[in-house]
């Protein structure tokens, strides 16, 4: 059974264009999640899924420099991009990660994969239905057949763009499971969507510069607890703003 982490990323961003190649402690942002995910022992492979557009050529080249395989597909139909990547890399189990989460944690990834394999479910996440981990540690695990079914049946643009909503919105069709943190830490924000997010992760990365990317999410939590001014840099930004906007766009305007 082959378990593949598929990391989605593109350079187009309404709030922070080109963020994937912004430098964080000497590395492009996208390298952080690729390097950290590669330390997860339950993953057989990590690949990057980006768009086929020329605007993302530099992103594909950045992944290739790490020796990471790259699959390129639709810019907006990210669900189809995942289907292409899963088929191309012959994945039996897919782990969904996003390139704007530089502190994605191999230990959390391993825990989610182990929980998925240890029970009869089609989908497992540490972010749905209720997030308790910090924003930026989201992991979703599902089988290839679950992905292919979602690809066949999902119709709404938000379901195509955000990959998994069709699955977790239909507990009558899929067996869902979740993994919770020991306490509610969902108010912490460690993802990069806006300039203030980038400032925050740069502060954290600079603190751990001597360790490169080899520090844990608990190390980050200890740091921002001890130095709360770091967490305050982006604490007021809402979680999942992009998905909320996509859902709003699904609704036809009333006249």
Image: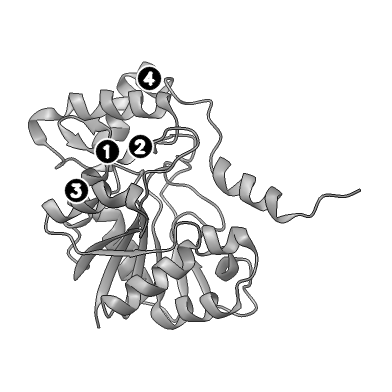
Q: Secondary structure at mark 2?
A: loop
Q: CA distance from mark 4 to mark 3?
A: 33 Å
Q: Secondary structure at mark 4?
A: helix
- Is residue 175 among what the camera can see? no
Instruction: Answer with mark 3 or mark 2, whichever residue precedes in sequence.
Output: 2
Disc number placed over residue 228 in the picture, else none: 4
Q: Which residue is mark 3?
A: 62
Instruction: Answer with mark 4 or mark 1, whichever residue precedes in sequence.
Output: 1
Q: Are marks 3 and 2 in contact (CB under 8 Å)?
A: no
Q: Which residue is mark 2?
A: 18
Q: Residue furthest front?
A: 54
Q: Are marks 2 and 1 in contact (CB under 8 Å)?
A: yes
Task: For marks 4 and 1, give the one nearer the viewer.
Answer: 1
The quadrant holding residue 217 is top left
Q: Which residue is mark 1?
A: 21
Q: CA distance from mark 4 to mark 1?
A: 27 Å
Task: For marks 4 and 2, give the one nearer the viewer.
Answer: 2
Disc number placed over residue 80 in the picture, else none: none
């Amino acid at each position: 059974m082959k378990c593949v982490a598929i990391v989605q990323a593109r350079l187009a961003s309404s709030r922070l264009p080109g963020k994937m190649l912004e430098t964080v402690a000497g590395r492009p942002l996208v390298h952080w999640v690729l390097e950290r995910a590669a330390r997860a022992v339950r993953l057989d492979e990590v690949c990057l899924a980006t768009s086929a557009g020329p605007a993302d050529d530099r992103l594909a080249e950045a992944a290739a420099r790490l020796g990471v395989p790259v699959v390129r597909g639709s810019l907006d139909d990210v669900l189809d991009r995942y289907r292409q990547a899963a088929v191309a890399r012959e994945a039996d189990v897919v782990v969904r990660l996003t390139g704007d989460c530089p502190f994605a944690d191999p230990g959390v990834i391993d825990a989610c994969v182990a929980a998925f394999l240890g029970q009869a479910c089609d989908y497992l996440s540490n972010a749905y239905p209720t997030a308790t981990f910090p924003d930026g540690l989201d992991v979703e695990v599902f089988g290839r057949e679950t992905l292919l079914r979602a690809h066949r049946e999902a119709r709404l643009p938000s379901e195509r763009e955000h990959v998994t909503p069709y699955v977790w919105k239909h507990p009558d069709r899929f067996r869902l499971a979740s993994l919770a943190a020991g306490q509610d830490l969902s108010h912490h924000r460690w993802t990069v969507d806006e300039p203030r997010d980038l400032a925050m992760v740069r502060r954290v990365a600079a603190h751990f510069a001597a360790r490169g990317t080899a520090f844990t999410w608990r190390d980050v939590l200890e740091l921002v607890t001890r130095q709360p001014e770091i967490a305050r840099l982006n604490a007021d930004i809402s979680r999942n703003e992009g998905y909320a906007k996509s859902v709003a766009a699904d609704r036809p305007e009333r006249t």
